[in-house]
Image: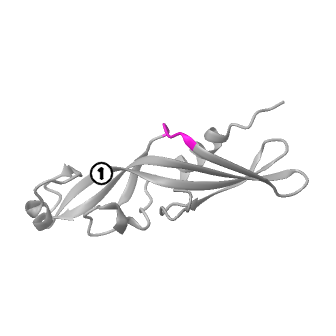
Amino acid sequence: MKNLKLKDIVDEHLFAELPGEELPNWGDLNIPANSAPTIETIDDGYKIDKIDVKKLSVDEYVIDVYFKLGMDVDFFVDRTYNRNEEKSDYYVLDFDWNDHVIHAGKTIDLPMFVTLIINSGFECLSIEINDFEGDSEYY
C-alpha cells in the first residue's frame, strides 16, 4: 500500500508558493517596515502540530494540517527609525540601500493552516494555504 507523504506534499506547495511573496497582515509582527515584507526563505524543519481528517466523498478526504513555519523576510526601514532604535530585533542586509531606507531582514515563525484534498490512492487533488495571517483559533 502506498503511503501518503503529507509533509513532502505540503513542503512542495510551500516552496512553490511562498518565496518572493509579500507577507500578509504583517503589522502585528513587530516588523518596523514601511511596506509589506517579502518572504525570502522558508524553513522545512517545521513539525506538524495537528492533523484533522474528514471524509469528503466515497474516495476523497479533506486533511487540515496545522504547524508553525519559520521564515526569513526582508523589508525596508526608514533610516530615521533605525537611528532612533536602540535595540532592534532585525538584521541589516544593506545599510546603504539608498538615502532614505535600510534593507533589513528578520526571522519569524508564523502559524500556518493548510488544507489538502486527497483521494483513496493517496494522490493530492488540491492543496491550499488557509491561514497565513495567524488568525487560526488553533494557535
Q: Is residue 120 above or below residue 110?
A: above
Q: Is residue 69 above or below residue 29?
A: above
Above or below 31: residue 59: above
Query: Would residue 103 appear left or right of 49 to someone viewing this image?
Result: left
Colour scheme employed for the rendering of this structure: one colour
Q: Judge from the rendering whether residue 25 lies leftward or rightward of residue 92; answer left or right.
A: right
Q: Residue furthest top?
A: 1
Q: Which quadrant of the rendered structure holds the N terminus?
A: top right
Query: Secondary structure under badge 1?
Result: strand
- Please give the range of residues in magenta: 44-48
Horizontal and vertical percent position of residue 78: 17, 66
Residue behind mark 1: 106
Inspect this view and state whether residue 18 appears.
no
Name which quarter of the figure residue 2 lies in. Answer: top right
Left or right: 128 with respect to 131? right
Residue 103 lies in quadrant: bottom left
Q: Nearer the viewer, residue 47 or 38?
A: 47
Tag 1: amino acid: Lys
Q: Residue at x 51, y 60 (%)?
A: 132
What secondary structure is the magenta-colored segment mainly?
loop
Location of residue 28 with respect to 20 vertically, above or below:
below
| Residue 44 x/y as whole percent | 49, 39
- 95 in magenta: no
Tell me the residue at 31%/69% (across/down).
Answer: 35
Residue 33 visible in the picture? yes
Query: Measuring 70% from the left and 51% from the top, which residue is drawn there?
Result: 52
Q: How far from the left and from the top, in percent, is residue 79? A: 12, 64
Most foreground residue, 13 or 110: 110
Label 1 environment density (alpha carbons within 10 Å; few <14, some 14–19, many ≥20): some
Q: Taking 44 as reference, is 13 left or right?
A: right
